[in-house]
Amino acid sequence: MENEVQKKRILSGIQPSGDLTLGSYLGAIKNWAALADEYDCYYMLADMHTITVRQVPAELRRHTLTQVAAYIASGLDPEKNVLFVQSHVPAHAQLGWVLDCYTMFGELSRMTQFKDKSAKNADNINAGLFTYPCLMAADILLYQPDFVPVGEDQKQHVEICRDIATRFNGIYGDTFKLPDPYIPQVGARVMSLTSPEKKMSKSDKDPNGCVYMLEKPEDILRKFKRAITDSDTERCVRFDRENKPGVSNLMSIYSAVTGRSFEAIEAEFDGKGYGAFKPVVGEAVVEMLRPIQEETRRLLSDKAYLESVYRAGAEKASYVAEKTLRKVYKKVGFLAR
Ligand code: TRP
């Protein structure tokens, strides 16, 4: 056989905790689709993470299936990418437990996401929320990936994953590859349309701050028309994250959608105010999403196909994951079955 160069591996995941947002699309999924030729890609729907916060069971199932359809509709070809559901691959829970035993109470207590989420869910600060980083470390380490594309907010989780892997490797010898977070050069960091200092998030209390991938065009347009712009006196379309966070957010969305540079956008709207800019961004987003929405709906009407995709995904993922798990079980001293 020809000496084929081993492609570098990528793994990432998004929780099916709600409808996917424009932020997940522009910041993650859209860029993932472009990586398939160069990398060996694994994309997981992290449903086991989702239940750290109480869910309505039927909704979780619907969000999970819809997310599979939206991944494919966004250009993630299931022949070229391994698309799978976390709970379909038992090795995640199995390695998660082992890693719980190699992670310290103190280091978990310092995680900012744990502190934030326990503040938001004061009546349900469960053990899963606390050990979440161990499960996420398992998600990653099972696949021995080179890169883990994540947003800023997840970098700390990739760091603790490296710490856990380093500790384990230190005790038992090389077992896990140390993954690097991969912050893509392209791809927008999409902020809330109503509070542009915060990341656009499906858990945002204000429904007008967040645009969903599958939202109706008229609702998307309305949200963009009402987007907060800045109270500076200049009133012109110019990129300045610090002093003009609202307009800068709209500019980076418009740039991600159209591929235009900030300079080109500034020139396009030179002499026109915010009022002219906002609906243009809204319409560009609607047009970008239109074919994805249609394809998602078409796929959702073909349940048998979606099932075949996530089943095949689980099979391919399990093959890789179990190999790592067997190694780990042996190293820690479990008797072979
Ligand atoms: N914790 C991530 C989030 O909430 C989702 C996630 C779970 C993930 N496991 C992962 C991301 C592994 C990257 C790699 O956004």
Image (cartoon, rainbow, N blue to C red):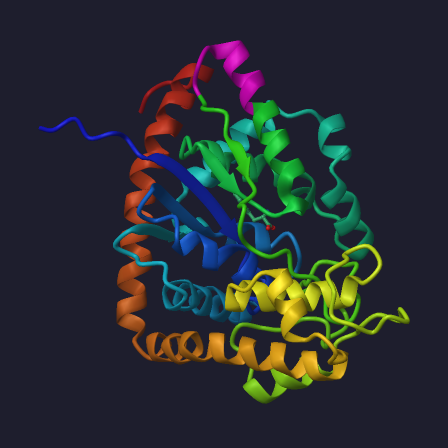
Query: In the rendered image, is residue 239 in sight?
Result: yes
How far from the left and from the top, in percent, is residue 221? 63, 84
Q: Is residue 315 left or right of residue 152?
A: left
Q: Residue at x 30, y 47 (%)?
A: 37
Q: Is residue 9 left or right of residue 231?
A: left
From the viewer's side, name the closer residue of 277 and 24. 277
Query: In the rendered image, is residue 122 in sight?
Result: no
Q: Is residue 61 left or right of residue 1?
A: right
**Magenta stretch encompasses residue 67:** no
Q: Residue at x 75, y 49 (%)?
A: 125
Quarter of image, res 71: bottom left
Quarter of image, res 164: top right
**Magenta stretch encompasses residue 174:** yes
Q: Is residue 1 left or right of residue 276?
A: left
How far from the left and from the top, in percent, is residue 14? 53, 54
How far from the left and from the top, in percent, is residue 257? 53, 68
From the viewer's side, name the closer residue of 324 and 150. 150
Q: Which residues are magenta?
A: 165-175
**Residue farthest along the left direction in this orientation:** 1
Please state, as top left, top right, bottom left or bottom right, where the C terminus lies in the image. top left
- Residue 137 vs 296, above or below: the answer is above
Please state, as top left, top right, bottom left or bottom right, where the N terminus lies in the image. top left
- Residue 183 vs 53, above or below: the answer is above
How far from the left and from the top, in percent, is residue 105? 73, 28
